Amino acid sequence: MKTEPLNNCDLQDLLEASCVRRKRVQLVYHDHNRNEVEINTYVADIYAQGGADYLRLDTQQVLRIDQLISVNGIARSA
């Protein structure tokens, strides 16, 4: 199992695989107030808009990928 930080390509691959396979993911991210939030959810879509990449979750919540701190316990590289 990979435990080193995820680079952007690995992160995108992991999120896309989770979306296609409908696998639940654990996301830790910074909200708009810079608080850490942890959720277990499904990724419904991944898309780019205005020069940024986004996740749309099954709850219809939208997150910028650069808000992510970790996915499934693996940190995102800076």
Image (tube, rainbow, N blue to C red):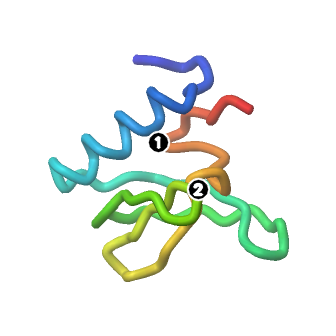
Tell me: 65 left or right of 72.
right
Tell me: 35 left or right of 27.
right
| Closer-to-camera residue (78/71) | 78
* Type of amino acid at the residue the image marks with label 2: Gly
The residue beneath circle 1 is: 72
Q: At 36% across and 37% down in the image, what residue appears?
A: 14
- For this orientation, the residue located farthest to the bottom is 60
Percent x, y for residue 64?
58, 61
Q: At 59% across and 18% down in the image, what residue appears?
A: 4
Q: At 19% across and 56% down in the image, what residue appears?
A: 22
Q: Using the numbered discs, state the Cα–Cα distance from disc 2 to disc 1 in whole angstroms.
A: 25 Å
Percent x, y for residue 13?
35, 34
Report the disc number at residue 51.
2
Tell me: 72 left or right of 13.
right
Q: In the rendered image of this protein, does residue 58 appear above or below residue 77?
A: below
Question: Which image quarter is the C terminus in?
Answer: top right
Question: Which image quarter is the N terminus in?
Answer: top left
Percent x, y for residue 30?
73, 62
